Image (cartoon, rainbow, N blue to C red):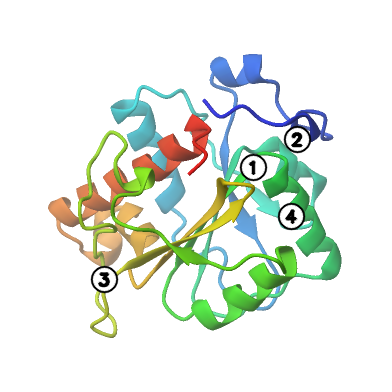
Amino acid sequence: MRRFSASLLVALALAPLTAMAQGSYQLAVLKYNGGGDWYGNPSAVPNLVKFCNQQLGMTINPEVPVVEVGSPDLFTYPFVHMTGHGNVVFSAQEAQNLRNYLIGGGFLHISDNYGMDPYIRPMMKRVFPELEFVELPFAHGIYHQKFNFTQGLPKVHEHDGKPPRGYGLFWEGRLVCFYDLECDLGDGWEDPGVHGDSEATRTKALQMGANIVRYAFSGAEN
């Protein structure tokens, strides 16, 4: 499990690591301003949590809360998921809060639900002006946790005929944000009837999601 830094551990509502071991820790969905549908894919993260508990032997609380970018409650959750199709706006306070959270040991997974890319990139620049998204090579550890993805991200939905791509933001050598593009990974976690995806497609999406969660909790430096 990831070792959180002192700054995250002393934040207002962070659950202690002993509580995490008892299954009281949670993954959360990030709520943001700007009009984008942060609430898209409502069954996605609950299904991912269930899969991680079953396949990785984790004990994540099955309840998935919503947390606002600028809220002190953000520090309660070691892993937050963000998705949507459109506009994203972070205020200066929200960008600073998210920065503090990520530097302090938190992890952000962004899943572009198609159409989010032109908005999320400048907003993450507000969070980390000094950093650039780096495309992760297929050999990166996030693709090789319990499940091996030798060609990187699985393709869940087709839009523009482009391959799926995975990007990261690294703070002092640690991956603090993973961003999947042209993939629709979160769609693949949804209930079977939502998008009509095959069981094979859903399984691959959930396996990749489990890899992300496992990597985030491993404390890996690269």
Answer with mark 2 or mark 1, whichever residue precedes in sequence. 2
Point out the frontmost of discs 3 and 2: 2
Q: CA distance from mark 3 to mark 1?
A: 28 Å
Answer with mark 1 or mark 4, whichever residue precedes in sequence. 4
Q: Is residue 131 left or right of residue 99?
A: left
Kindly identify which numbered label has been placed on residue 157: 3
Q: How many marks?
A: 4
Q: Secondary structure at mark 2?
A: helix
Q: Is residue 22 left or right of residue 150?
A: right
> Are circles 2 and 1 on residues that touch, CB within 8 Å?
yes
Which residue has dot 4 on it? 99
Determine whether 119 is above or below 111 in the image. Answer: below
Name the image quarter holding residue 72.
top right
What amino acid is found at the position of numbered circle 1 in the picture? Gly
Of 195 and 18, nearer the camera is: 18
Which residue has dot 1 on it? 106
